[in-house]
Image: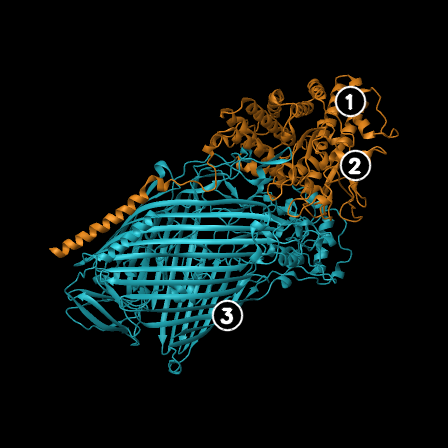
Chain colours: A cyan, B orange
């Protein structure tokens, strides 16, 4: 609280210091237009060089600015080449900006500022807001997929969840593996609160020297998001809306009822039991559970924004409504978003502003296991019996593995989630002594998430019933703040250009969850659901809190715009660390050489720009959730003992003694080449990078004989990610036809350089594998988390074949494993590396075409050189259904198959991690296709519309892959990446939309 | 110049305010934040209440899944001729690997059993190591430590039977150098068990007041010690310990069938029972699944139908022995509590000793969560007493103790279960072993009892049991992998 007063005091102070500083100024007016089309450009920044004094052009492209008559005007606009104009006493200066078809000449957003792309010495990619909003994605990050070399986006199949973003390979294993998102100066782990169409620009900082200014949160890469600001001039109103549907694509076909009964009988036979179904054919095709539970889901999204500004203020307000149905019949998500940015310039040397986002969302949830239920449900069971009661798997003596009727699961599941979030910042910016600029910003993120679940009294089937109603309510409060103060000095003298930045920041992040539970709360609608109305009430809470305090500085220097030098340093202290490890200092340096500025390049006409750059830097990852040096006492409910019939909550210590942790540090080198050729038709960028993560923190499992839970958290390893990135774009025009074709590819090699266990391998990846077997192994000099297990060389056909093998306890129809150590028997020593879950190639093609009023964009994206462990095949507890593929290819008697096992694939021997379950995870897809038509303006102006565009959009309409699971996009934590135990289907989305500007 | 002075003034004002923020955020306290909703370990181990909570945690772990459900079923039950997997033929088929002795080291129940027992050992070690430093009532302190020594001994007893040599931990590991330790020879494990039980018996009371019913008693320590001695064929010790127990006032509960119902828990025959109950409003704490996994399949309030009696067991009872009906639920029967068991279903028989009447089931909780687990009964002690006496040549005592058990089963029906009177050592031994089987059936005793008797091959051989291999189970593969070769595998499982 004290700190907030301090800030407001500071803001107040600024308003007092208000005298006009530049008495000798003159007013300069003019119009900015596109050099080619002559069209007026709206919102162009016209700044007085060396100061932050500046303005933006209005809707007619007109600007008016006060400047000293001997200074220089800097005219910049995203997508256009920045121009510098010596005022030389003039009062009226019209400017024609050249379209920077060559993106390498534009302006990019970097940490705590902007920089001409030309001056950047690290690896920074920009994606424009319009490219993001064009994708019609709910989450802005999904829209980045395939757009930027080296950035791998894995969409989660689960509706509403944020995608996993990995920049240049997995460098961190434990804790926070999220990229850092900085939205208008405020730090976030996730930006799902942002409406994609509120985004003006995204800057992706990839190399260590670019991210180093973000210190302890820089190691996983940084994405800087700039939101749309108001523009001076007349008011503009925009409406963007689309409606469409989402439908399951590339579904996995399951066995039908007759096939199911047949294969289950085989399963019983191989378990020496009599068949369960007397006459499989009598069941026909049975119930198609996915048809019963899934649907094509309707989605609609509307956004209205209004922006404008007067001389001393500008604003942008947008309101959005999203209503999205899920593919599961009862699933629905509604989201209301608001974003407001206000900028004031009360005095010439002072700017104040606010940007704020509000979000309210409400969802009707689905049971967590419903997709697995649909996958496993027996097709012999009808949805309803003739008398209207639910079909009951128990009536068919089916096992506990699928003892549910998915329709009943859905009908009696009653959970709603609501989310309130308010986040943003206020800032003040003061220019003084011509070249100095002080900025202070206070950002906050306040959220409240509530999950309310009511389990009513009901009877559906033998196992699906409830006699005591239970209401449970979880409420999580998030309270984060961040203060940042920066002082910038910017000057140009002769051939030298210099920018010096010094800054300080402090932040505090806290989350607190409260859970309550009560029984026998009377039903009767949401408005009557209160814990106080129930009995047997219990409550628990939990949370996390961490703080950090940091200082940083940066110098950017350019000589003749030819030789470039950038250096940063940052010192961080974070609450997760103690003693000698409290502070960490992280330096970085970068240099560039603009070869085309050299005299010897003067006469060549191939290269418009050729730049060589290199950088080195250290970045940190403080992404451990708390100070692990403070061991805590376990007090879980299961530790309740009973004496004399009365419960006693126990408490004790059940973790290993933690070690002192130090910051995880990434050391990265980047060498890049940027080129623009053939009159800027072709731009090309190539990078080589090498990043090692030192002191990588992760959990090493400890022997269970310690009797502890949770393993040993420590600085355990050194990991290397090394690779190349290439991207190229060709832009061209031919009459009224304009086009651009671009491609990018990231090639990454991941390797474990050192691990505290020395040469001993680290086994992980038990999640989702039947019987808890560990399916991955990390060993020095090899990639992290490779799949590890037995190599299948065939399927036993006869008992005689089994008897003469090294697997005498096998049955015919079981996998025959390779005896790799040649000792005649199959033991754990025969396990070998089966595949690599770390993708080697990550690529995308992005094209856009324009002809007269039509525009077309086609984006393609894919992964190659990656393996998936298809854990669903053997993840069986009983009589779950099989895929049609498995049914068709299974072994069911000598000679029927030499590659697929019998129905008994879930037994211990067959379900042991082996090569049968490892498949290629390569895929290629049409990521996005959009066709738009802009109505001729002559028609529209009569009815007061400036611009009207209609479009049709398809996302993921075509997917090509050989993988036999649902979706080749498989995430998972490091060490268990690529293990697919999920059965979320892949979706395609089709939308029709309209953009209107008034 | 006035103008630049003004600027200078402003700049210093800014710097001043910025500095205020800086100093604020730099304070050490700003960076020293507490763990949320967690008690730092440094604040624990201070009071008698902390000691009590830590002891409760050790007790509580005894009814956790890996200690009383699937893992013990795999390791301690289905290998025997008493029970088999049950449930639907295709559910949890890995259980058959324990029944047929085809199990390999990677099977998950081995690891579950291993880690479950070592978790119990850790909770006991925490108390034994840290409670001595707490300032509290000295008698209570000594009793808490004694209770945990019993709990630790019980866990090692289960481990040494299951795996033979195992890592021996008598204190929590101090640091990383103590995480990965080799196996200790089983003779030393047995010695450690005996030391703990001697210590415990010396301190523990004979009984408790009503509020503490369920805590470990002196009788429990002596009885487990007798059993540990019996597994080592130290017959004089067995006799001595069981004789001491006989002097503690236990008596056989008259009605064998009713002894296992929830309303007769902690009865006069009960020596060690793991306490379990349904705690209203707290299903997470009401976590015992002992009864649920064995409950009647296909009936609401029943259970999953695992660990079912074999026909071999049903046939093992003498004609008319009422314990047959008391121990086994047959399809189509109606239980004395009035539950009608459907005539058709997956399995012909279920365990009646873990049976909890269906009417007690509350949805949202495990079926039969109210059931205590009877670990040591006085009948077991009498049969140990009989066996020890016989081995030591005292047929009279042996016959007398055996007869007590048979007489209770016989009740008032003189036509059944005639008294065994042949004072022949071998015949008497056979009779005692047979009595152990029918008296203690499905109580997780039979499998290791037969191996102890040296009859593994004779009794389980037809099912696949092999000498010099199946006396113990394999060491869990994950545990060997994590040990980087420090742990060795048992013979025959490599």
Q: Which residue is mark 2?
A: B326
Residue A691, image x, y percentages? 38, 48
Label at residue B401: 1
Residue A260, image x, y percentages? 70, 57
Vertical order, A34 against A506 (above or below): below
Q: Nearer the viewer, residue A290 or B63?
A: B63
Helix, strand, or loop for circle 1? helix
Gap in angstroms between the C-alphas marked 3 and 2: 67 Å
Within 10 Å of disc 1 (Cα), the crowding (few <14, some 14-19, many 20+) is many
Do callouts 2 and 1 mark residues in contact (Cβ within 8 Å)? no
Do callouts 3 and 1 mark residues in contact (Cβ within 8 Å)? no
In the rendered image, the residue lying farthest to the right is B415
Q: Chain of mark 1?
A: B
Gap in angstroms between the C-alphas marked 3 and 1: 84 Å
Q: Which residue is mark 3?
A: A243
Vertical order, A61 against A166 (above or below): below
Look at 76% across and 55% down and name the residue there: A277
Which quarter of the figure is the C terminus of chain A placed in?
A: bottom left
In the rendered image, the residue lying farthest to the left is B1
Q: Would residue A735 be found to the left or right of residue B311 on screen?
A: left
């Amino acid at each position: 609280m004290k700190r907030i007063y301090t800030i407001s005091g500071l803001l107040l102070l600024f308003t007092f210091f208000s005298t006009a500083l530049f008495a000798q100024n003159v007013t300069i007016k003019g119009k900015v237009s596109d050099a080619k089309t002559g069209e007026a450009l709206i919102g162009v920044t016209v700044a007085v060089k060396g100061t932050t004094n500046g303005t933006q052009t209005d809707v007619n492209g007109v600007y008016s600015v006060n400047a000293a008559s001997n200074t220089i005007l800097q005219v910049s606009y995203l997508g256009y080449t920045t121009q510098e104009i010596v005022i030389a006493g003039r009062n009226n200066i019209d400017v024609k900006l050249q379209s920077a078809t060559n993106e390498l000449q534009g302006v990019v957003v970097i940490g705590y500022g902007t920089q001409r792309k030309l001056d950047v010495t690290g690896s920074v990619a920009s994606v424009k807001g319009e490219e993001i909003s064009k994708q019609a994605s709910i989450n802005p990050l999904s829209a980045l997929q395939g757009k930027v070399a080296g950035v791998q986006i894995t969409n989660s199949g689960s509706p509403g969840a944020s995608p996993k973003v990995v920049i240049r390979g997995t460098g961190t294993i434990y804790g926070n593996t999220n990229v850092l998102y900085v939205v208008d100066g405020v730090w976030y782990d996730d930006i799902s609160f942002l409406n994609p169409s509120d985004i003006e620009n995204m800057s992706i900082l990839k190399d260590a020297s670019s991210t180093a200014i973000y210190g302890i949160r820089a190691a996983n890469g940084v994405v800087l998001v700039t939101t749309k600001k108001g523009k001076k001039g007349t008011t503009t109103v925009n409406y963007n809306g689309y409606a469409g549907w989402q439908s399951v694509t590339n579904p996995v076909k399951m066995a039908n009822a007759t096939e199911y009964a047949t294969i289950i009988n085989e399963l019983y036979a191989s378990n020496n039991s009599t068949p369960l179904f007397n006459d499989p054919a009598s069941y026909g095709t049975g119930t198609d559970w996915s048809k019963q539970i899934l649907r094509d889901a309707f989605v609609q999204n509307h956004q209205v924004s209004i922006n404008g500004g007067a001389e001393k203020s500008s604003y942008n307000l947008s309101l959005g409504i999203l209503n999205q149905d899920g593919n599961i019949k009862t699933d629905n998500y509604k989201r209301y978003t608001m974003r407001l940015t206000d900028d004031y310039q009360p005095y010439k040397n002072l700017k104040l502003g606010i940007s704020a986002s509000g979000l309210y969302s409400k969802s009707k949830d689905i049971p967590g296991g419903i997709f697995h239920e649909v996958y496993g449900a027996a097709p012999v069971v009808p949805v309803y019996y003739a008398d209207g009661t639910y079909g009951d798997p128990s009536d068919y003596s089916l096992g506990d593995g699928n003892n549910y009727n998915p329709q009943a699961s859905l009908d009696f599941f009653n959970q709603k989630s609501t989310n309130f979030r308010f986040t943003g910042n206020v800032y003040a910016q003061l220019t003084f002594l011509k070249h100095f600029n002080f900025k202070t910003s206070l950002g906050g993120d306040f959220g409240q998430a509530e999950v309310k679940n009511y389990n009513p009294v009901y009877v559906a089937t033998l196992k699906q019933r409830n006699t005591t109603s239970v209401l449970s309510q979880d409420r999580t409060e998030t309270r984060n703040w961040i203060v940042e103060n920066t002082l910038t000095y910017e000057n140009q003298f002769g051939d030298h250009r210099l920018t010096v930045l010094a800054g300080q920041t402090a932040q505090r992040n806290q989350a607190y969850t409260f859970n309550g539970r009560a029984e026998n709360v009377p039903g009767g609608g949401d408005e009557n659901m209160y814990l106080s109305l129930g009995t047997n009430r219990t409550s628990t809470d939990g949370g996390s809190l961490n703080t950090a305090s940091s200082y940083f500085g940066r110098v950017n220097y350019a000589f003749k715009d030819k030789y470039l030098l950038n250096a940063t340093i940052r010192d961080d202290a974070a609450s997760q660390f103690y003693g000698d490890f409290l502070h960490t200092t992280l330096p970085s340096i970068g240099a560039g050489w603009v070869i085309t500025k050299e005299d010897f390049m003067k006469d060549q006409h191939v290269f418009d720009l050729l730049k060589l750059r290199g950088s080195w830097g250290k970045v940190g990852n403080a992404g451990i959730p708390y100070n692990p040096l403070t061991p805590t006492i376990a007090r879980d409910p299961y530790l309740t003992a009973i004496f004399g019939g009365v419960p006693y909550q126990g408490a004790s210590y059940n973790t290993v003694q933690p070690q002192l942790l130090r910051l995880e540090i990434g050391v990265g080198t980047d060498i890049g080449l940027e080129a623009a050729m053939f009159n800027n038709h072709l731009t090309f960028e190539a990078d080589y990078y090498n990043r090692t993560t030192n002191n990588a923190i992760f959990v090493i499992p400890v022997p269970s004989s310690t009797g502890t839970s949770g393993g040993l958290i420590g600085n355990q390893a050194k990991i290397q990610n090394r690779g190349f990135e290439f991207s190229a774009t060709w832009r061209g025009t031919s009459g009224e036809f304009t086009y651009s074709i671009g491609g990018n590819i990231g090639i990454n090699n991941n390797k474990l350089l050192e691990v505290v266990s020395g040469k001993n391998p680290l086994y992980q990846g038990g999640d989702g594998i039947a019987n808890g077997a560990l399916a991955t192994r990390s060993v020095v000099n090899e990639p992290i988390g490779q799949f590890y297990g037995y190599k299948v060389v065939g399927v036993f056909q006869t008992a005689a074949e089994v008897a003469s093998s090294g697997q005498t306890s096998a049955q015919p129809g079981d996998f025959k494993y390779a005896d790799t150590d040649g000792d005649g028997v199959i033991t754990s020593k025969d396990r070998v590396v089966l595949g690599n879950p770390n993708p080697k190639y990550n690529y995308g093609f992005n094209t856009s075409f324009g002809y007269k009023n039509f525009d077309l964009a086609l984006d393609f994206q894919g992964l190659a050189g990656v393996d998936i462990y298809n854990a669903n095949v053997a993840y069986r507890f009983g009589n779950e259904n099989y895929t049609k593929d498995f049914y068709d290819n299974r072994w069911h008697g000598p000679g029927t198959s030499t590659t697929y096992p019998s129905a008994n694939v879930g037994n211990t021997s067959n379900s042991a991690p082996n090569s049968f379950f490892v498949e290629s995870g390569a895929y290629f897809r049409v990521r996005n296709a959009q066709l738009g038509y802009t109505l001729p303006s002559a028609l529209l102006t009569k009815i007061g519309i400036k611009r009207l565009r209609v479009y049709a959009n398809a996302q993921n309409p075509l997917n090509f892959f050989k993988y036999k699971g649902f979706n080749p996009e498989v995430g998972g934590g490091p060490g268990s990446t690529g293990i697919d135990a999920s059965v979320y289907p892949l979706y395609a989305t089709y939308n029709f939309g309209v953009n209107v500007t008034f | 110049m006035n103008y630049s002075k003004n600027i200078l003034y402003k700049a210093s004002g800014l710097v001043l305010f910025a500095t205020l923020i800086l100093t604020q955020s730099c304070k050490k306290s700003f960076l020293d934040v507490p763990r949320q909703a967690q008690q730092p370990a440094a604040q624990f181990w201070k009071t008698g209440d902390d000691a009590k909570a830590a002891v409760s945690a050790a007790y509580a772990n005894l009814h956790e899944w890996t200690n009383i459900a699937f893992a013990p079923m795999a390791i301690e039950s289905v290998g025997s001729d008493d029970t088999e997997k049950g449930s639907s033929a295709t559910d949890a088929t890995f259980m058959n690997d324990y029944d047929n002795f085809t199990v390999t080291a990677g099977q998950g129940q081995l690891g579950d059993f291993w880690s479950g027992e070592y978790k119990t050992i850790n909770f006991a070690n925490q108390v034994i190591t840290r409670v001595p430093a707490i300032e509290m009532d000295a008698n209570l302190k000594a009793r808490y430590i004694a209770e945990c020594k019993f709990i630790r001994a019980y866990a090692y007893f289960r481990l040494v039977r299951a795996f033979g040599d195992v890592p021996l931990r008598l204190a929590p590991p101090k640091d990383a150098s103590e995480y990965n330790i080799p196996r200790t020879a089983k003779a030393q494990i047995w010695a450690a068990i005996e030391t703990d039980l001697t210590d415990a018996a010396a301190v523990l009371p004979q009984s408790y007041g009503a509020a503490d019913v369920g805590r470990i008693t002196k009788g429990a320590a002596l009885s487990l010690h007798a059993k540990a001695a019996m597994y080592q064929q130290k017959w004089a010790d067995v006799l001595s310990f069981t004789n001491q127990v006989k002097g503690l006032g236990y008596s056989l509960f008259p009605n064998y069938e009713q002894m296992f119902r929830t309303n007769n828990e902690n009865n006069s025959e009960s020596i060690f029972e793991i306490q379990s109950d349904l705690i209203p409003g707290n299903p997470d704490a009401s976590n015992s699944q002992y009864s649920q996994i064995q409950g009647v399949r296909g009936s609401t309030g029943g259970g999953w139908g695992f660990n079912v009696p074999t026909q071999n067991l049903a046939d093992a009872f003498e004609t008319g022995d009422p314990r047959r009906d008391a121990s086994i639920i047959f399809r189509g029967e109606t239980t004395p509590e009035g539950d009608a068991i459907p005539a058709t279903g997956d399995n012909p028989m279920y365990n009646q000793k873990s049976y909890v009447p269906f009417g007690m089931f509350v949805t949202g909780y495990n079926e039969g969560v109210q059931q205590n687990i009877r670990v040591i009964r006085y009948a077991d002690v009498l049969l140990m007493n009989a066996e020890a006496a016989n081995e030591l040549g005292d047929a009279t005592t042996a016959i007398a103790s055996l007869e007590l058990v048979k007489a209770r089963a016989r009740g008032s029906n003189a036509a059944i279960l005639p008294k065994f009177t042949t004072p022949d050592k071998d015949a008497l031994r056979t009779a005692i072993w047979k009595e152990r089987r029918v008296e203690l059936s499905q109580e997780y005793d039979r499998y290791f009892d037969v191996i102890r008797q040296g009859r593994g091959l004779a009794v389980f051989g037809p099912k696949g049991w092999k000498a010099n291999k199946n006396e113990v189970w394999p060491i869990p593969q994950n545990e060997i992998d994590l040990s980087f070769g420090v742990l060795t595998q048992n013979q025959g499982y490599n």
